[in-house]
């Protein structure tokens, strides 16, 4: 019997400081045991449990993409006991990784569709995974237009800056990068919160267009009416929820929102599905 | 299905013989209550109990169970690598479990044994266990099993059901596991007295004086019920302690915690409770179930609505009555169930969060 | 105390009708013998659900914590002392609470009575001085004074120490009560014997926290047992963690505990954790002449500095 509580041993292969205030770091893990990477086959939108012996576990969205091989990456905000400890770990340290867990963005259903990605703050991780997945030469023809609205507090708080610059240069993805405010005179992108930028830049909704939204509660709250105004139906608005989790596979009971469990039935839900739950997240 | 008759004089001998092949567990008296313990060599289960204070769920789902172990000693090659701890999954038998508690294991199984993920700790223990049930001829006034999908002679979840017949026990062998146990105990004298079982069942069911109604729960709109007006009143007295969830045979929620002593550590599964505020609190401090009313509602909605909708296997309650008897402030699931089952959506108060 | 119910309904009805308060906190009849359920009523029509008898042992001060409404509450002697403590500790404002004092002759001990009769108790009927216990097969008449909760037997403040009105005339206070005979016995034990005693005392604990949660003093937003940063103690059933919880909680209640008995009453596994709180109560009495919750004008013993403090370290 597989033991879903038992993490794969991994080694920290690289650490990137992502944000100017050092609150965000991206950890690149390699599996210690041959074969484990194959078992860790995942889809964009899933999460893993980063497992630190002696400290505990945290559920974090997978930031690397299924088309990237040889490693998995997670971008972690320093907040609680485990993430703070992780931020103090160094390259070469050994820890554990469980997963992949949860469902994913409905890639089968999204084939042939236009995709609008709306992301804010450090919730951009599984969105990064999704963009890299869709831009992969083998996958890009499967999707229509791709628009990305991504905002952070300031230019220094944007994740994956090198990639953002690269994507800006491409003509097969429309990037709408924004910051809440900046005093950088050379800033050549948007200034403003995600909801109004979405209203200005995002394509109209319709049967063939889906929005994937991931961000802090306040952003989601104000983006939802914007998307409705743009004509996105509730079953075309796809969101990834967060709740306190422990097991990550639907047994420990704490992440329930009505009869759905965020860790197992989610974290990806359409707004239509979410509207049918008591929204206890 | 086979019936065997066991002369009470041979009961102890049979259990002693079975103990060669099984670890035996059963109810024993401890001060003012009964509890399920592993029986020592020659120790007999006390079948003169009504039921144990805590349910026997800990036999499969201990309150604290070590799952993994690891060393933090960097001089070791395997430091920081987690390993499953070995478990004793040798055959065991629970003697004298009540039918309500046996049925509860099947409800808990829905959580721990799913098509795509299985909890190996719970499931291995479950598979290693033979459940020898004792029919319940003296139920309490707070028992409502017969209207909770169960009953004093209910067979679901049992491998053998034993009834008391003065000088003898009459045992109904229900499964292959039950047969293997009967063979190990040397209980071979077959009987054809099924009528005795039927009579005992009818008589015992007649002694169940408490009932709930659950017929409307499935058809009531989930969100309307969630927004019902009565939750503040139901929750007012609640202390948000863990008594109901810990004493409940069907409550399965747990926490995962690391414990470190020196350089060696373990990862444990501990019982947890939806009554506790920290059960759901996010690292940011945001708590989706921040108020007492929200937490109390979660418990009753989980048992009597979410579970009903999700599994279509009835309610997540077997009517054992422990929470009713033990709640320090007398919050009574029978009363709450009545309110939920008779709820009409027109009563819904949309103002409630 | 027998027969307070009608008077209480009148008072509650009057207060609600005249809009003096937004809610009245009391008890309603339980679904089991010897159990009542704390409840609130907000309309004069609902006061008929209120009742009072010898099964109202839960401390209603616990239900006042951080509430915003204007509230009337029925308060026994112990409850009133906890309301005083609440006022001192800013958990409720004096002018926010209308205290309906309930002179009390003690609450009966469900666990003790259950242990005195054979079979399930189907009904319990009380008079001013007697408790009639009916099981399926028998009927037993008990003297109420013999079956009180231990804290009620030892109680020295049966009458509310603060109130806006009383349900009835004050009852006689008990005198010549030796509150600490059992505590002195533990004090004389050797360390080995003490260790075994406490090990046995706390071994049934399932960490449900009913004791803590029934206690009006335990209102910390995050209890030390739940604190994760730093984590003070493990969350499993390690006996060291279980004991640490009980000992530290008792210390946290030192000089504040009124021995209302709610903790012991609430405990589903029958632990007498009052042995811990009463030891500290005794120390506060011996060291500082302090009894908790008697006056809103006095700070608790461990909350003040006095030059004549008997401990040398403070000088």
Image (cartoon, coloured by chain):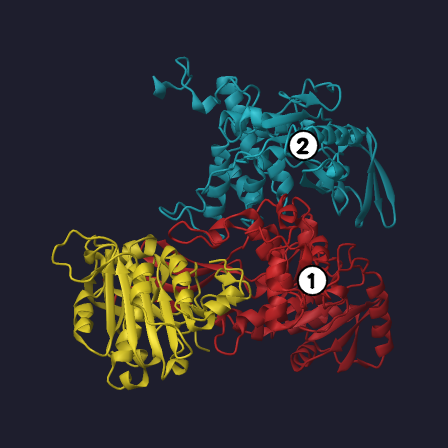
* Chain identifier matching the red colour in the rendered picture: B
**What residue appears at the point 53 percent right and 38 percent down from the top-left corner?**
C193
Hey, which quadrant is residue C154 in on the image?
top right
Quarter of the picture containing the N terminus of chain C is: top right
Question: How many residues crowd mark 2 within 10 Å: few (<14), some (14–19), many (20+)?
Answer: many
Q: Residue furthest left?
A: A186
Q: Residues within 10 Å of mark 1 (few under 14, many from 20)?
A: many
Residues indicated by labels 2 and 1 sit on the same polypeptide chain: no
Colour used to depict chain C in the structure image: cyan
Chain assigned yellow: A
Q: CA distance from mark 2 to mark 1?
A: 33 Å
Task: Report in which chain the residue with disc 1 lies.
Answer: B
Residue placed most toward the observer, B267 or B232: B232
Residue linked to disc 2? C150
Query: Circle 2 — which element?
Result: helix
Residue indicated by mark 1 = B45
Q: Is residue C25 something that shows in the picture?
A: yes
């Amino acid at each position: 019997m597989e033991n879903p509580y038992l993490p794969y041993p991994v080694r920290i292969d690289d650490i990137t400081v992502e944000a100017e205030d050092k609150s965000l770091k991206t950890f690149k893990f390699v599996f210690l045991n041959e074969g484990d990477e194959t078992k860790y086959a995942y889809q964009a939108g899933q999460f893993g449990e980063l497992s630190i012996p002696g400290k505990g576990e945290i559920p974090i969205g997978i930031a690397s993409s299924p088309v990237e091989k040889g490693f998995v990456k997670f971008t972690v905000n320093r907040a609680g006991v485990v993430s703070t400890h992780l931020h103090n770990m160094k390259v070469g340290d050994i820890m554990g990784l469980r997963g992949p867990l949860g469902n994913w963005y409905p890639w089968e259903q999204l084939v042939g569709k236009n995709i609008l990605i709306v992301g804010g703050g450090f919730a951009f991780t599984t969105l990064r995974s999704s963009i890299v997945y869709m831009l992969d030469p083998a996958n890009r023809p499967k999707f229509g237009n791709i628009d990305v609205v991504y905002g952070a507090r300031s230019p220094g708080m944007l994740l994956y800056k090198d990639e953002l610059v690269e994507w800006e240069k491409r003509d097969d993805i429309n990037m709408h990068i924004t910051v809440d405010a900046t005093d950088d005179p050379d800033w050549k992108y948007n200034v403003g919160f995600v909801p109004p930028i979405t209203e200005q830049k995002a394509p109209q909704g319709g049967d063939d267009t889906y929005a994937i939204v991931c961000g802090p509660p306040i952003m989601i709250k104000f983006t939802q009416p914007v998307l409705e105004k743009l004509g996105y139906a509730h079953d075309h608005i796809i969101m990834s929820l967060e709740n306190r989790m422990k097991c990550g596979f639907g047994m420990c009971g704490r992440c329930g929102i009505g009869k759905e469990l965020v860790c197992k039935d989610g974290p990806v839900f359409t707004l239509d599905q979410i509207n049918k739950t008591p929204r206890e997240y | 299905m086979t019936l065997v008759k066991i002369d009470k004089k041979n009961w102890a001998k049979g259990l002693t013989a079975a103990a060669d092949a099984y670890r035996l567990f059963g109810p024993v008296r401890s001060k003012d209550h009964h509890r399920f313990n592993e029986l020592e060599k020659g120790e007999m289960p006390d079948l003169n109990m009504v039921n144990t204070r805590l349910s026997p769920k800990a036999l499969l789902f201990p309150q604290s169970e070590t799952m993994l172990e690891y060393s933090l000693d960097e001089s070791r090659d395997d430091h920081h690598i987690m390993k499953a701890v070995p478990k004793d999954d040798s055959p065991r038998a629970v003697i004298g479990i009540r039918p309500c508690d046996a049925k509860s294991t099947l409800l808990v199984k829905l959580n721990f044994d799913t098509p795509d993920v299985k909890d190996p700790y719970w499931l291995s223990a479950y598979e290693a266990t033979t459940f020898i049930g004792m029919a319940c001829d003296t139920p309490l006034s707070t028992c409502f099993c017969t209207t909770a999908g169960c009953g004093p002679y209910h067979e679901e979840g049992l491998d053998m059901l034993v009834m008391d017949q003065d000088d003898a026990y009459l045992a109904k062998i229900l499964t292959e596991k039950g047969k293997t146990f009967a063979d190990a105990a040397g209980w071979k004298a077959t009987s054809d007295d099924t009528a005795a079982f039927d009579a005992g069942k009818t008589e015992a069911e007649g002694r169940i004086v408490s009932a709930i109604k659950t017929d409307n729960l499935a058809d009531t709109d989930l969100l309307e019920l969630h927004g019902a007006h009565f939750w503040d009143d139901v929750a007012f007295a609640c202390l948000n302690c863990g008594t109901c969830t810990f004493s409940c045979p069907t409550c399965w929620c747990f926490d995962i915690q690391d414990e470190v002593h020196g350089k060696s550590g373990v990862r444990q599964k501990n019982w947890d409770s939806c009554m506790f505020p920290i059960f759901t609190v996010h690292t940011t401090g945001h708590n989706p179930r921040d108020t007492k009313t929200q937490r109390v509602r979660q418990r009753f909605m989980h048992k009597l609505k979410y579970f009903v909708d999700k599994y279509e296997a009835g309610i997540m309650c077997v009517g054992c009555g422990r929470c009713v008897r033990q709640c320090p402030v007398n919050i009574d699931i029978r009363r709450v169930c009545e309110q939920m089952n008779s709820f009409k959506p027109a009563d819904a108060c949309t103002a409630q969060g | 105390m027998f027969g307070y119910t009608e008077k209480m309904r009148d008072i509650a009805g009057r207060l609600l009708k005249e809009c003096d308060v937004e809610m009245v906190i009391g008890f309603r009849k339980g679904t089991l013998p010897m159990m009542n359920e704390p409840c609130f009523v907000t309309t004069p029509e609902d006061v008929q659900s209120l009742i009072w008898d010898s099964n109202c042992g839960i401390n209603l001060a616990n239900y006042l914590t951080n509430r915003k409404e204007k509230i009337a509450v029925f308060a026994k002697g112990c409850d009133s002392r906890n309301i005083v403590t609440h006022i001192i500790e800013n958990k409720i404002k004096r002018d926010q609470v209308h205290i309906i004092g309930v002179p009390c002759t003690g609450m009966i001990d469900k666990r003790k009575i259950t242990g005195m009769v054979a079979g399930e108790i189907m009904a319990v009927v009380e008079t001013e001085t007697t408790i009639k216990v009916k099981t399926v097969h028998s009927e037993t008449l008990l003297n109420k004074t013999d079956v009180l909760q231990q804290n009620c037997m030892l109680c020295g403040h049966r009458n509310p120490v603060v109130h806006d009105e009383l349900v009835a005339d004050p009852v006689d206070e008990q005198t010549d009560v030796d509150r600490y005979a059992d505590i002195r016995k533990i004090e004389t034990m050797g360390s080995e014997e003490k260790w075994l005693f406490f090990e046995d005392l706390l071994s049934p604990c399932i960490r449900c926290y009913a004791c803590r949660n029934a206690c009006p003093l335990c209102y910390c937003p995050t209890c030390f047992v739940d604190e994760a940063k730093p984590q003070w103690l493990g969350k499993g059933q390690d006996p060291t963690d279980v004991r640490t919880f009980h000992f530290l909680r008792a210390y946290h209640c030192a000089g504040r505990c009124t021995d209302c008995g709610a903790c012991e009453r609430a405990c589903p596994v029958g632990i007498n954790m009052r042995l811990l709180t009463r030891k500290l109560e005794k120390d506060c009495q011996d060291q500082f002449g302090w009894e908790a919750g008697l006056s809103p004008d006095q700070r608790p013993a461990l909350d003040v500095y006095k030059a004549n403090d008997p401990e040398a370290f403070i000088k």
